[in-house]
Image (cartoon, grey):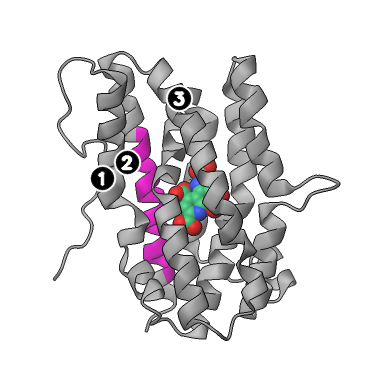
């Protein structure tokens, strides 16, 4: 059996006995890229153009569960964060996904991606395709943000440090291999290419500022490991539900 991913737990590495400087902390967080869901076999096959329309549709419909939960996760962080300056910037994440009266958000863009792939909007909205493992993983992420200290919840969003590379690869793969998908449906990925770096930069600033003790640094690393596990579990569940 090939093990492609070991459980993260809290200990991706032993960790130093004393607090490290902000840049060393960033290095430690970035080193978790090897456990990002871009390495999951389902994503590897997706980007190699090997997935069937059925598998792409299954992935899109299930990922909608995650997309829908992101604003609730961010609202939980806002609810727990006592810092007005941070809230003023963080709130943007909610409108990026929900939209406003005058702008369309990421959730609408994802619904259009689904339609471009052949999943009717109402089938995404009513959740009929969501498999249990995806629902549980997404729920765990929202619960984490509600119940853990807000700085840990901010650290857990740092998988977005690794997202732009995957997004760019995915965009190119969809344009090249999945020509049956209406290209206008790919706007979601195009938007995230600039939103994700902006968001992760803010989250990194917060973590560098607030995680100066060894305990808080360990917690930040553990939060990111937890989030990598959330994303990995989703991919495992999707892979199993839509086999090749
Ligand atoms: O498609 C992806 O691979 C991917 C990954 C992630 C991520 O790394 O958490 C996010 C997104 N997409 C995404 O679209 C998104 O809006 C998003 C928000 C967050 C977050 O944790 O706050 N992650 C992600």
What is the CA distance from the residue labelled 1 to the residue labelled 3? 24 Å
Secondary structure beneath label 2: helix
Residue designated by label 3: 205
Percent x, y for residue 23?
A: 29, 25
What is the CA distance from the residue labelled 3 to the residue labelled 2? 19 Å
Mark number, residue 117: none
* 19 sits to left or right of 197: left
- The foreground one among 33 and 201 is 201
Percent x, y for residue 156?
A: 43, 37
Give the class, few, some or many, for how many residues have Cα within 10 Å of label 2's Cα (few <14, many ≥20).
many
Where 139 falls versus 180 (above or below)? above
- Find residue 116 and report its image quarter: bottom right
Mark number, residue 225: 2
Whether 229 is among the magenta residues is yes
Give the class, few, some or many, for how many residues have Cα within 10 Å of label 3's Cα (few <14, many ≥20).
few
Residue designated by label 1: 8
* 90 sits to left or right of 161: right
Disc on the earlier residue, 1 or 3? 1
Residue 134 visible in image? yes
Is the magenta region chiefly helix, strand or loop?
Answer: helix
Q: Residue at x 58, y 71 (%)?
A: 129
């Amino acid at each position: 059996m090939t093990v492609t991913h070991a459980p993260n737990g809290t200990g991706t590495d032993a960790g130093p006995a004393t607090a490290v400087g902000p840049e060393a902390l960033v290095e430690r967080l970035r080193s978790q890229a090897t456990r990002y869901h871009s390495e999951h076999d389902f994503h590897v096959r997706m980007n190699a153009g090997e997935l069937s329309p059925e598998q792409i549709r299954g992935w899109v419909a299930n990922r909608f569960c995650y997309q829908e939960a992101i604003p609730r996760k961010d609202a939980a962080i806002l609810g727990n964060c006592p810092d007005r300056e941070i809230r003023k910037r963080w709130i943007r994440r909610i409108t990026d996904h929900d939209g406003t009266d005058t702008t369309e958000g990421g959730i609408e863009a994802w619904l259009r991606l689904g339609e471009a792939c052949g999943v009717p909007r109402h089938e995404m909205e009513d959740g009929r395709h969501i498999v249990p493992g995806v629902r549980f993983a997404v729920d765990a992420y929202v619960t984490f943000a509600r119940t853990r200290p807000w700085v840990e919840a901010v650290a857990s969003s740092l998988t977005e440090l690794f997202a732009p590379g995957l997004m760019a690869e995915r965009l190119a793969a969809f344009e090249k291999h999945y020509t049956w998908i209406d290209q206008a449906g790919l706007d979601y990925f195009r938007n995230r290419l600039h939103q994700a770096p902006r968001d992760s930069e803010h989250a990194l600033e917060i973590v560098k500022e607030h995680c100066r003790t060894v305990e808080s640094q360990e917690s930040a690393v553990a939060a990111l490991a937890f989030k990598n596990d959330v994303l990995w579990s989703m991919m495992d569940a999707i892979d199993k539900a839509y086999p090749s």
